[in-house]
Image (cartoon, rainbow, N blue to C red):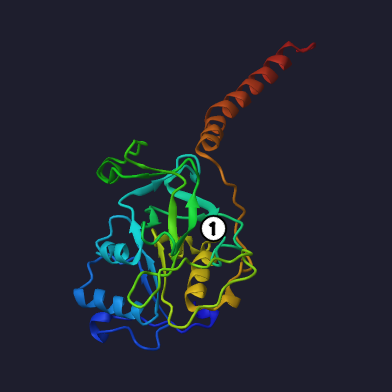
Amino acid sequence: LRNENYQVDSLVLAQKGEVPQDADVVILAGPTRPLPAEEHAALEAYLERGGSVLMLLDPRTRADLDADLQRWGVALGNDVVVDRLQGFFGRAATPFAGEYASHPITGSLREVTLFHVARSVTPTEAGRARFTEIVKTSPDSWGERDLEGFFGEGKAELAESDLRGPVSLAVAGKPIVKGTEAEPEAASPHAGVEVEKKESGGPRLVVFGDSDFAANQLLDNYRNKDLFVNGVNWLLGDVEAIAVRPTTSRPSRVELSTQQLSTIRYLALFVLPEAIAFLGVYAWWSRRRAPGR
């Protein structure tokens, strides 16, 4: 964010008592502890005065923001997104996402983004006209709701109670707070080209069901950095900065499904060694039978 010429500072709401007047965006990046009632009130007051908030919320987080988000028009899924066919090198809980909405944040993205142990995020019925589901996983994925079985035993099976894919991993829009009218979120008519200006006094909210995609380990993978920074650009109303940034040098990658990875493993461990051994024995036998031997 500093490379985008933004000033970034840490904020401890318990010390300040409120969000500073000069704060354009507040980012809650992977909170793990419950927020005091005063901090909930401070965030509510910040949005009511037209602030913008970005939340990155992992599954089973103890940050008790579910009720606030429900009131603002966003529902957090009590699940973990699983994709056995399009997981990172066969890791079902590390899914790729490549279905993007026609929205300023994602309209210019063409490559996939990578998430790790993510949860679903969707608009509520009241927030459906205000929020856009901007990132989704493949149709083969699902939201696993048996969290005890997943985290305790490592099991994940698609059941009737699970959320079937594609699964929304993020939403963006205008929260339902005092002083806002119930009008739809205006999306870009030409994705990635025309984008709307942020109206003064209009609060904005972006919620991701994962914080790992923006952590050091995954940030430079695929289009993760663009997705994160574009989200901040949009919250700031800095629409000219929304872009697909030049790709930095990185090792070449091949995206493989679980079946393809298993086939390569089988060929490498069993077929190729046996083929080489057979050819070696055949060459030896042929020389033994050659005339003059």
The reply to whether residue 58 is in sight is no
Quadrant of the rendered structure where residue 91 is? top left
Quadrant where the C terminus is found in the figure: top right
Image side of residue 151 versus residue 85, left or right: left
- Front residue of 99/252: it is 99
Question: What residue sits right under mark 1 in the picture?
Answer: 101
- Callout 1: SS: loop
Q: Residue furthest bottom?
A: 21
Furthest-left residue in this view: 37
Can residue 203 be seen in the rendering of this structure? yes
> Which residue corresponds to the image point at 31% horizontal and 41% vertical from the top-left?
154
Relative to 14, residue 293 above or below? above
Question: Is 261 left or right of 167, judged from the image as shown?
Answer: right
Q: Please state the total of marks drawn on the protein image.
A: 1
Tell me if residue 89 comes above or below residue 10 in the rendering: above
112, above or below 262, in the image: below
Residue 137 spot, x, y in % from top left: 48, 49
- Is 221 left or right of 249, judged from the image as shown? left
Instruction: For label 1, count other residues whose C-alpha is less than 10 Å away and answer few (under 14), some (14-19) or many (20+).
Output: many
Q: Amino acid at mark 1?
A: Ala
Of 155 and 182, which appears nearest the observer?
A: 182
Residue 150 image position (x, y, % from top left):
30, 43
Residue 234: horizontal and vertical position, in percent?
51, 73
Question: Can you tell which quarter of the image residue 47 is in?
Answer: bottom left
Task: Find residue 1 and report its horizontal and vertical position in percent.
Answer: 49, 77
